[in-house]
Amino acid sequence: MNNQKKIAKYKMIENDILGKINSGFYSKEQLIPTEQELAKEYDVSRVTVRQATNNLVAKGYLIRNQGSGTFVAEPSHINRTTNIKSFTDEMTGLNKKVSSDILTFKIVPATEFVSNKLNITGGSSVYYIERLRKADDEPMMLEMTYMSVADYPDLSYEKLQQSRYNYIEQTRKVSLDYSHQVVVPIMPSEEIINHFQCDPEQPILKVLNSTYLANGEIADYSVLILNSSKYQYQSIKLK
């Protein structure tokens, strides 16, 4: 480690543990050493070790169970990709039953932030939608979405029970093109903990998502909170 001083200690530990996972040193579903054991192994504090393992949890390589320890993530965990594909299609492709709890569906005036995201006039009417997306009754994602009322005047509670992307393409007859996403790790709020029944000390992922249509217009702006122990983020770059 002496000739890598410019790399933060937690990052070196993170990379080393990831290397052991990829090489098979730590196998799938295996319990890794405790924070105390890792701190001794790497000659660092437990805080440094936790920073490293928290990052690997947020990235989906590890999963932390209260009272049991930290395990290498199971290969069955679901990956979310940046491809334009609805949650419904993703889960159906995995032979999972899809359902949505619609927590909020209302019309509100667009704030300056939302109007900039949707490229509409400030104060215009927009839908604000909160949905808890589930697969086989397991909560996978909390979705908070803004859409222009003028662009989607016939959007309804019933349509939101199904795929929103299918509604846009099949009902509105507009083609989707791509999503622009910014991914950040966050600590779960009390609301998220209640929805996901997750570890309050385990980071999860927040995805800021803007979906673009083939004509260059913006279809929606969404904030997606992923239940990272069940539903993991995966990005694919094309040349």
Image: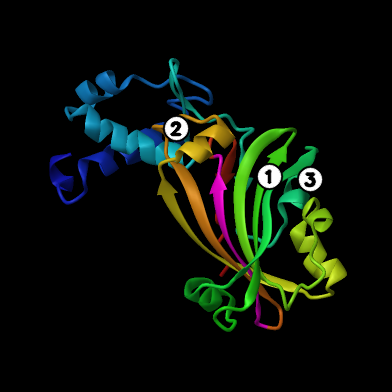
Q: Which residue is mark 2?
A: 21
Q: Is residue 194 left or right of residue 93?
A: left
Q: How many marks?
A: 3
Residue behind mark 1: 133
Q: Amino acid at mark 1?
A: Arg
Which one is in front, 89 or 116? 116
Kind of element beneath mark 2: helix
The nearer-to-camera label among 1 and 2 is 1
Is residue 148 at least partly visible in the picture? yes
Q: Quadrant location of the C terminus?
A: bottom right
Q: Earlier in the sequence, mark 3 or mark 2?
A: 2
Q: Position of residue 90 (x, y in %)?
A: 73, 49
Magenta-drawn stretch, dominant element (helix, strand or loop): strand
Range drawn in magenta? 216-227
| 35 sits left or right of 22 in the view | left
- Relative to 144, is 52 on the left or the right? left
Residue 95 in the image, given as x and y percentages of width and height: 80, 38
Q: Is residue 207 magenta?
A: no
Give the number of the disc on residue 93. Answer: 3
